[in-house]
Amino acid sequence: MLYTDTVDHPTIEEITVYPLNRAELRMADAYVGGRPSVERQALEQAVRGRGTAYVARFRHTGEMSWRMPVLFSAALADGRMTIDHFDTLWRRLDRHAGVRQEIDDQIIRREDRAAERARRELLRAEALAAGEPPPDWSADGDYNDDWSGYNYGEPAFRLPEPENGRCSHIDQVVEREVMDWLQSIPQRMSTRDGSRTVVPAPSVSVHRLRDVVDRAATDAVEELARLRDESLDWAEEADRRREEAAVKAREDADRRARRRAERAAKKAAKDAEKKAAAAADEAENAAAAGQVIEVGPAGPAPY
């Protein structure tokens, strides 16, 4: 009966196959890792001599090395994944309809932001040329793709351009799922007495990897759609609350204005009563003194 306890001696795969897998992965990583030009040319010549299909697998593996660095490091340490696995990973993501639609939408949004930035720069230049203050769009959101969170300058490290676009959120979800799948498969199995080793089952096969990638990509696309719907709901809720707050503010302002008007009217009435009482008192005092006082609109006037 097979079980997953470790054994003290390496398997034949660990001695012969895994080092070759790691070497190919390191070559693909070195191909995009900023190596010297001489080394890059040597790698290009070595890869080009193996055919167009191998060049494509090599190129896709190099791209996945920076798109999914955690998975790539785990594959180097594990030794069972090859450039065929990473090529399959790249192709399944590239051919997934939902992922493709998300990438196309991102490209459209990026182009829209670029057009908006160009329009704002033109309006700012026209305002400065006319001697007017430049427009302020600080409350309308950020339209700079290079913004790092601290400044608007050139990023300290810019990632290479992907061959056919990518979505970072989908890459992270798929990377996490493939990592869990890889770690769930035991490195090797042995007999109970540890006398021999066999190939573990299920193995790290390309066919199983396809299913994992397709399922993870579908879940990631659905999660993005759900988050987008929730963000729209939150935006609608925020707009509704802002409208309610504006209506309440107007009602409060009208209420305060009515109260001020009522207080002003009461004060004016009291002042008029005081003036009338003062005029009556003055008329009585004048009558007592033998003077005739005429009380008119302008107040008492002796004559």
Image: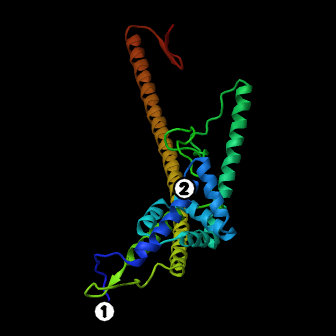
Residue 92: where, in percent of width, then height? 60, 73
Q: Residue at x 61, y 39 (%)?
A: 137
Total tally of numbered discs in the picture: 2
Left or right of residue 183: residue 261: right
Disc 2 residue type (three-letter): Ala
Q: Which mark is residue 1?
A: 1
Residue 14: where, in percent of width, then height? 40, 73
Disc 1 residue type (three-letter): Met
Q: Mark 2 and mark 1: span between their CA atoms?
A: 43 Å
Q: Which residue is mark 2?
A: 30
Left or right of residue 275: residue 117: right
Secondary structure, mark 2, is: helix
Q: Residue furthest left?
A: 193
Q: Where the N terminus falls, by quadrant? A: bottom left
Q: Nearer the viewer, residue 252 or 152?
A: 152
- 10 Å neighbourhood of mark 2: few (<14), some, or many (≥20)? some
Q: Nearer the viewer, residue 294 or 180?
A: 180
Q: Residue at x 65, y 28 (%)?
A: 133
Q: Are marks 2 and 1 in contact (CB under 8 Å)?
A: no
Above or below — where is 276 with respect to 202?
Answer: above
Left or right of residue 180: residue 42: right
